[in-house]
């Protein structure tokens, strides 16, 4: 799903853009709205959009200045510019600065905005492919495992940001982004005699020796699968990145083999923490899952801890439903719900589609419409009041959503309820 940031200093334009399209049906989600160029630049850094739809003339930073500021830092970011007739020369300048399209506000409608979004999505994919090509050219002479290790290390880094998206694109280009998982090997040397007297250098050699043992075991267990070990971490842990998995059973077998080997030659205690098996853009969730596993392990150490079993994918959908119910009188966005339950918006959307057969926003709107019916039946509230109470920007959009689910307008529903 493509994340879209809207930026315009006119509230009516922002509201109109948000309500004009069924964004999710275009595989898009509005990840934020800004009232000036400086706020838009800050949101770009926080929300990480794929596409920005912005006014050319805005306070603090103009649309052109925003476009230029983002060009170096976020080369994958695609811009669609909004303009008035008198700013036509600025619109042409934006195209020279690699905006994908511009739209005249006076002529803006659903068809034109949809067309521009599709151009922007195509451009997003083109820039990602160019990024993969550039990354691939940097790794001439590298083996597949070495190249995958570099990009997986970026993906699992806390500071990844946009780099995570580039890493996923590069892994896709390498053919290493399907049915992937990460496994964290935690080594506890506390049972080794006199470990407290070891120097830092001696500890590093100790961990290095055990990492090499783990690599030997992995080469036997993961034969026929894609796998690589990432550069060693300062805390002595080792991370394996795997692809081509059906489930996490090979990782469980790896832990069992490693435990048996260590029992014969070393008192080092080991644990393996395994993420769920993910593909494509879901891979952005791997780092979050590893962090969750580390926290769970710190509270209750387990020899083998698997995210898919211990956390449970179904729990996310249930947690998201609870969030929607608790915030039914607010504007509910997929990115806010995902942040509240600790996963990415794309991953949450894919879970809803997979488990419930509907988009996340379809579920939100259906839930809001159901609640709206209870408010309308009493006859105590006007339609515009119910629209405002439920967090919709305007009564027109609320009416459009209501009719989609109830096959009648809120006014018609209220009248029919009064007759009954």
Image (cartoon, grey):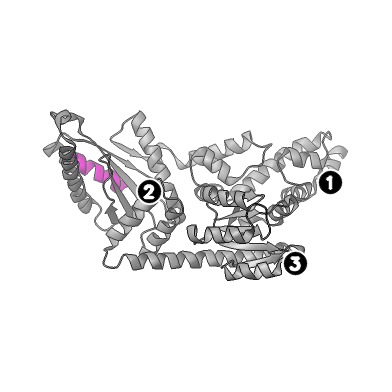
Query: What range is drawn magenta here?
Result: 246-260
Secondary structure beneath label 3: helix
Q: Position of residue 339 (x, y in %)?
A: 52, 41
Alpha carbon distance from label 1 to label 3:
43 Å
In this picture, is 293 found above or below 66? above
**Mark 1 or mark 3: whose residue is earlier in sequence:** 3
Q: Earlier along the polypeptide chain: callout 2 or callout 3?
A: 3
Looking at the rendered image, the disc whose residue lies closer to the viewer, 1 or 3, is 3
For the residues labelled 2 and 3, the Cα–Cα distance comes to 47 Å
> Compared with residue 409, is residue 192 higher up or lower down, i.e. above or below?
above
Indicate the position of residue 98 as horizontal and vertical percent values: 56, 68
**Disc 1 marks which residue?**
412
Q: Nearer the viewer, residue 151 or 356?
A: 151
In terms of secondary structure, where does tag 2 sit? loop
218 relative to 122, above or below:
above
| Magenta span contains residue 191 | no
- Horizontal side of 143 relative to 174 (left or right) equals left
User: Is residue 129 visible in the rendered structure shown here?
Assistant: yes
Quadrant of the drawing holding the N terminus? bottom right
Considering the whole magenta stretch, tell me its main secondary structure.
helix
Where is residue 420, by image quadrant? top right
Which secondary structure, mark 1? helix
In the image, is residue 252 part of the stretch drawn in magenta? Answer: yes
Where is residue 204 drawn, in percent x and y? 19, 41
What whole-number distance in Å separates the C-alpha atoms at marks 1 and 2? 53 Å
| Residue that label 3 marks | 86
Residues at circles 1 and 2 in contact by the CB criterion of under 8 Å? no
Q: Residue at x 58, y 35 (%)?
A: 322
Horizontal arrangement in the rendering, residue 333 relative to residue 127 (left or right): right
Closest to the observer, 229 or 234: 234
Using the rendered view, name the quadrant where residue 308 is placed. top left
């Amino acid at each position: 799903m493509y994340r879209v940031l809207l930026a315009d200093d006119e509230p009516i334009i922002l509201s109109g853009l948000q309500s004009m399209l069924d964004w999710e049906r275009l595989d898009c989600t509005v990840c934020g709205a800004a009232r000036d160029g400086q706020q838009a630049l800050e949101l770009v850094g926080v929300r990480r959009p794929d596409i920005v739809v912005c006014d050319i003339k805005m306070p603090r930073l103009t649309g052109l200045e925003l476009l230029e500021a983002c060009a170096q830092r976020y080369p994958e970011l695609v811009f669609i510019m909004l303009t008035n007739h008198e700013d036509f020369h600025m619109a042409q300048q934006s195209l020279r600065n690699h905006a994908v399209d511009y739209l005249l506000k006076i002529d803006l409608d659903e068809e034109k905005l949809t067309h521009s979004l599709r151009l922007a999505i195509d451009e997003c994919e083109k820039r990602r492919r160019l990024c993969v090509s550039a990354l691939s050219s940097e790794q001439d002479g590298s083996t597949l495992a070495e190249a995958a290790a570099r990009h997986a290390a970026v993906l699992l880094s806390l500071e990844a940001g946009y780099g995570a998206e580039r890493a996923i694109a590069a892994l896709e280009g390498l053919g290493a982004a399907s049915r992937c998982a990460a496994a964290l090997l935690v080594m506890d040397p506390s049972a080794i005699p006199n470990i407290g007297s070891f120097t830092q250098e001696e500890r590093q050699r100790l961990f290095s020796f055990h990492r090499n043992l783990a690599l030997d075991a992995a080469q036997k267990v993961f034969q026929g699968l894609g796998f690589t070990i990432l550069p060693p971490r300062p805390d002595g842990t080792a991370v394996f990145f795997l692809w081509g998995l059906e489930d996490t059973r090979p990782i469980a077998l790896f832990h069992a083999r490693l435990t048996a080997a260590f029992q014969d030659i070393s008192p080092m205690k080991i644990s393996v923490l395994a993420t769920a098996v993910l593909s494509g853009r879901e891979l952005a969730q791997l780092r979050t899952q590893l962090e969750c596993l580390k926290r769970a392990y710190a509270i209750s150490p387990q020899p083998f801890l698997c995210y898919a079993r211990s956390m449970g994918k179904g729990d996310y959908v249930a947690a998201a439903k609870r969030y929607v119910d608790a915030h039914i009188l607010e504007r509910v966005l997929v990115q806010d719900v995902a942040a509240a339950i600790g996963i990415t918006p794309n991953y949450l959307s894919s879970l809803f589609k997979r488990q419930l057969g509907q988009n996340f926003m379809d579920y939100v709107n259906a839930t809001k419409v159901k609640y709206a019916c209870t408010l309308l039946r009493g006859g105590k509230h006007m339609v515009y009041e119910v629209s405002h109470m439920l967090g919709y920007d305007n009564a027109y959009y609320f009416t459009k959503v209501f009719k989609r689910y109830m096959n009648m307008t809120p006014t018609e529903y209220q009248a029919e309820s009064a007759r009954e």
